[in-house]
Image: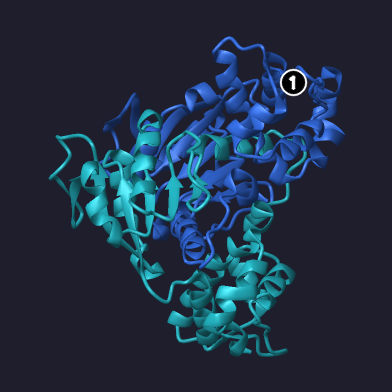
Chain colours: A cyan, B blue
Amino acid sequence: MGEILSANRIEGAVRKDVPERVISRLPIYLQTVETIAATGQETVSSEDLAARSGVSPSILRKDLSQLGRSGTRGVGYSCPELASTLRTFLGLDRDRSVAIIGAGRLGSALADYAGFRRRGLRLTAIFDIDEEKIGTTIGTLTVSSLDDLPTWSEHIDLVVMAVPAAAAPAAARAAVDAGVRGILNFSPTVLDAPDTVRVHQVDLASELQVLAYYSALDTAPLNPGFEEHRN
Amino acid sequence: MGEILSANRIEGAVRKDVPERVISRLPIYLQTVETIAATGQETVSSEDLAARSGVSPSILRKDLSQLGRSGTRGVGYSCPELASTLRTFLGLDRDRSVAIIGAGRLGSALADYAGFRRRGLRLTAIFDIDEEKIGTTIGTLTVSSLDDLPTWSEHIDLVVMAVPAAAAPAAARAAVDAGVRGILNFSPTVLDAPDTVRVHQVDLASELQVLAYYSALDTAPLNPGFEEHRN
């Protein structure tokens, strides 16, 4: 069934039809199936893959069928084939370059974050506007001036924003001007970006408030895992 | 219309009927309306509130109508009333206590994260297993031994996990045993928790992979903001 995922189809009809709630689960499936494949296991059942990914088997089967993948009864999915399908579909067959804007505590912690590399993400640069931070070293990277972002633009696909709220709009404009196509925003402010740039907000206080809501319910909530959280 | 949100109704039918994708947007509305109220503005139109929250006006109106709130034509919503409704509904009429497990770079950065307090979240403790970190100070907190977590249990509603993947299962068990009801997990691993404990996963590599997917599309994607991201 791999044919349906040839490059042309991916750029065309198939990609556009897959809803974002499905897309958002694919990286989890990829990570799970790669972890399983790394142990030498050749196939995985939908039940096992679903449990390890924190979704129900029926959600998993529906999601993967949208990519043209269905398991074989009694055998399940081929791990290497499924991993390859997911990587190709997500556009991870080439590494993506990521830059961090903000070399404060959070930016430094994120630069340190384990496992980006083995998940197809290459950290290429970290920027700040603070003269005291520019030129210092974080991990293997030297902090660059945000003014130099344009000279890096060919080497940056995605940006992680880890700056104070007040600095976020200017930093986002710099990233957009440099041609960045996606921004993961940790700054507690909604960013204005043109339609061609995708912005995902990571709002820690909101996440905790949602948890607070459920922890305050009289009745014990069922633990929905990833599935309901993203649906 | 505030009557519908009296304590009894909140604990009962109303709460259970509101889907999580709606719940997840309420903290954003709350933050937006509080920001607007802080400027002294008494009312806000659904269009303005929606734009500032990154959703469409129709989504906003539908979401708030589930809480028994509807705007007045030509006037909009009363800011103080809407803020109060949202706070009560989310259970933020009392502060929630938050502890961080893991006093490394990420944990320290999160301890520093601005704006928890003014959003009803009180950081009460930070834990680690590293003897070198225990007893040191981060902001106004002293790092405690994870072994002491049980003695803190009355003062912790929610836990933020910022430990390496290998340490996460044991740390999660300690939190569950201490009676924690919600875990926000930054560790790149799926946690096993009983049905009574809610776990939200923050998976940075997955977020970036989803961004990579959209940035690789031939056609420029529409920027959906929060709305589509969570739907």
Q: Is residue B24 above or below residue B98?
A: below
Q: Is residue B107 visible?
A: no
Q: Would residue A116 be found to the left or right of residue A22 on screen?
A: left
Q: Would residue B30 be found to the left or right of residue B73 on screen?
A: left
Query: Which of these two is toward me, B228 or B3?
Result: B228
Of the 4 image quadrants, the one containing the N terminus of chain A is bottom right
Q: Residue at x 14, y 35 (%)?
A: A132
Q: Residue at x 55, y 74 (%)?
A: A11
Q: Residue furthest top?
A: B40
Identify the residue under disc 1. Answer: B76
Q: Would residue B16 be found to the left or right of residue B205 on screen?
A: right
Query: Which of these two is toward me, B107 or A89?
Result: A89
What is the x, y in percent for residue B124?
45, 28
Could you tell me the amino acid type at mark 1?
A: Gly
What is the x, y in percent for residue B145?
36, 39
What is the x, y in percent for residue A209?
60, 34
Query: Which of these two is toward me, B202 or B145?
Result: B202
Q: Residue at x 16, y 41 (%)?
A: A134
Q: Is residue B152 visible?
A: yes
Chain letter, disc 1 residue: B
